[in-house]
Amino acid sequence: MNANTTMDRTVYFNAFPPNQLNKWLELYSHRFMKPVFRLFQSELEVVYEEKNLYNDNFITAIFENFAKKFYKTHPYGQQTTIGTVEHLKNPSLTKMYNFFKTYYVANNMALVLSGDFNTDEAKKLINEKFSQIPSGKIPEFAEFKENEFAGREEITMKLSPIKIGLYGFRAPKSGHEDEIAFEICNAILSNQDQTGLFDQLMLDNKLLAAQVFNIPGTDYSASIILSVPKILGQSLESAETLLMTELHKLSAGEFDETLLNNAKLNLNKQFQQQLESNESRAVLIAEVFTQNKDVNSISELVEKVKKVTKDDIINIAKKYYGNNYLAFQSKMGFPKKNKLEKPDYKPVAPKKDAKSPYLEQFEKITANKPITHFVDFEKDLSYSKLKENVDLYVVKNPINEIFSIKFKFGLGMYNNPSLAYAAQLMNFAGSYHYTLKNLKTAFSNLGCSYSISCDDSYVYVELTGFDNKLKESLELIKELFVAPNVDKDKLSVIINGEQSTRKMESSEPDNVARALFNYVRFGDKSEYLNRLTIKEIKKLNTDTLITEFLNALKYDVTIHYTGNSDIGNLKNYLLNCLDLGYDFKKGNSPIVKIPIEYNKSKIYFVDKKNALQSKIYLFTNGENYDLTQSPYINAFNQYFSGDFSGLVLQEIREYRSLAYGAGAGYVTPELPGIKASFYGYVGTQDDKSIEAIEVFTNLIKTMPEKPERIDNIKVFLEEASAVSYPFFRDLSETVESWKRKGYTEDPSIKRIEVYKKLTFNDITDFYKKNIQPKSIVYSIVGDKKRIDMNVLAKYGEIIFVKQNNLFK
């Protein structure tokens, strides 16, 4: 359950079992007719925390300031969805009620359902429940005229840890007849296949980054070209010149028509992928409604894409990518942040155990039993050994003819840190037969995307394309398996990118907090320390990295394929692809890092001056993980931190307004027999840090007991397990993970039986053994001047950590 708001619409989205449709419709129809804003005051202070969260992020500052200059009169730029500090200081419950009564009316709403249900029965229930919502007279929206830019209008500010350029052009608004052609036009500039005109600038090491993206609106839209110059020796102006040269090529028709055809092919593929899941289908339909389009426009998209010609693209480029645009440049610097002081009003505490008459009536509504859908290891997928140390999982694609395939080679960067950069470099590699540009074009001609990446345990090679081009796609990727070839200047792309990433990661409080939490758990094996320094990366050479990549390909490989190709043909294609002249050897993946053991409470503190929020993590060591514990772990996690029904958000957010975001969980390792751990997180204003730590610590050490919640917990766990069937593209990796842990069937089958007999004592017993007696280790990133360090010291020895010591 969640919701979000943009300038043009508000969307509420839920996921629930089909058997609960009647209860869900009853609840939501009532909510939209007779809401009671009990949490208005407490949630207002929570929004303060959300505001602080955004203000600590330099990206927020860049885009808010860009929008102000791009939309000089329209609310798109002159206000934000969260509002100003003054808005938050002077809230009006009356205005909120008036807003609700005006806009939450039937003729301004759409209900989108996507899932496994009987359509006729659903329509009947919807009519019964939602027909009670009255229609209303919706006020005409004011018109805000935005004039064209007077040539190139430049704005320069200091907002970011690196140089960033945003170049904004007026774009066709949502539903405009130019919208599809414009989207294809942008795909010719930059795309996921890295074949666009801007992509080539990056591949040729002329820019650190360049891409174009569209921010659609019902009144106006913005097309934004984002540019990151090279860290050393390149100005924003020279980067802009390169981009504008490519734009002029587009409007002059100086591009290969292959780019157009491939952009259309990939747009078709992306559209089909959007229809694969309930969630993405629902989001697509909701967007159509909020953009004032006809729902039939979805089915017409493919035909409209086919009709776009090169002349159309040239005309679109001339029309929208002319000489009138906003050049917004952010140079290195950090603006002064507007700190929100803790409000002086007290939240109204809700009656925790009270039941309204409506709730009593609602609880009497019965739901049908859920229809269970468990994974059958034998029927729902197939497993085979292609040859020694080569495993193959196959899942049929029930939706379309798009395949996905993932190779997992059993060596990762934990044992070889340079593999991280070798894997990156392979995305810039050509081969013996293909230059880099020609190889990417060849993949794009097939409608196939590929990527190469690495984590602690594996090197991944992933492809997504059309089944009728599977053979050719695998033949192309073999080019990189056999004889990758990398121009020496491509290593500079990796180095420049890594320099940029590391400058940004240490500037953001959230990143510093994650690095500190990693350090607390794993010491020098933290992912931010168990890596090469920039100096060490600069000493690498392309030949060494190619050798490291090819060496990783010699380790055991698991292949996950989802698609509809004939199984015999598939195996032959794969055997040919992996015919590399050697036998694959067994590695030791997956790598499971063991957290440091603590026998007393400690506080690790990074003083982040001018941070608006403290980022606080709490950690305790757990016991050895046993598969039989899983149902009780799930029950504890649901009780302790199950979204808004769990103790954490209720005690920290709902009752005390201490944070916008908070969470916790008992986390299990990838393999049984290894120590699990517990973590908690809260982000709060510096001046509320001590109170937040006190509340969270009390939750961990003296967990409130509310046995009356056990029935709801049991229902949730049983029904969630009954409908937890994985998304079809995730199915085989899910089963592989289960089998690695020792499961021989879908674990939900036995878990449901445990949930049926679950008692509240099971939850408290698990808590008392695995969490309560453990020492808490705190990691805090915040402004030391705004936190009472003497009070903080009561929770453990304070160890100050320099930020630079967290990053290598």
Image (cartoon, rainbow, N blue to C red):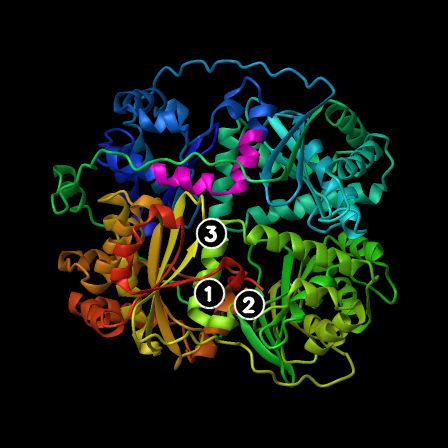
Residue behind mark 1: 518
Q: Residue at x 45, y 73 (%)?
A: 670
Q: Is residue 227 left or right of residue 744?
A: right
Element class at badge 2? loop
Q: Residue at x 71, y 17 (%)?
A: 150
- Amino acid of disc 1: Asn
Q: Main secondary structure of the magenta part?
A: helix
How far from the left and from the top, in percent, is residue 50? 39, 40
Asked if disc 2 and disc 1 are in contact, CB closer than 8 Å, the reply is yes
* Disc 2 from disc 3: Cα separation: 17 Å
Range of residues picked out in magenta: 47-65
Earlier along the polypeptide chain: callout 1 or callout 3? 3
- Between 376 and 137, the one nearer to me in the picture: 137
The circle drawn on residue 510 is 3
- As displayed, is residue 231 above or below residue 533? above
Q: Is residue 524 visible?
A: yes
- Amino acid of disc 3: Asp
How far from the left and from the top, in percent, is residue 247? 79, 34
The circle drawn on residue 529 is 2
- Between 678 and 56, the one nearer to me in the picture: 56
- Asked whether residue 9 is drawn in magenta, I would say no
Q: Residue at x 71, y 71 (%)?
A: 569
The circle drawn on residue 726 is none
Earlier along the polypeptide chain: callout 2 or callout 1? 1
Q: Residue at x 66, y 48 (%)?
A: 269
The crowd level at tag 3 (other Cα within 10 Å; few <14, some 14-19, many 20+) is many
- Between 789 and 697, the one nearer to me in the picture: 789
- Between 285 and 781, the one nearer to me in the picture: 781
> Which quadrant would residue 452 be assigned to in this image?
bottom right
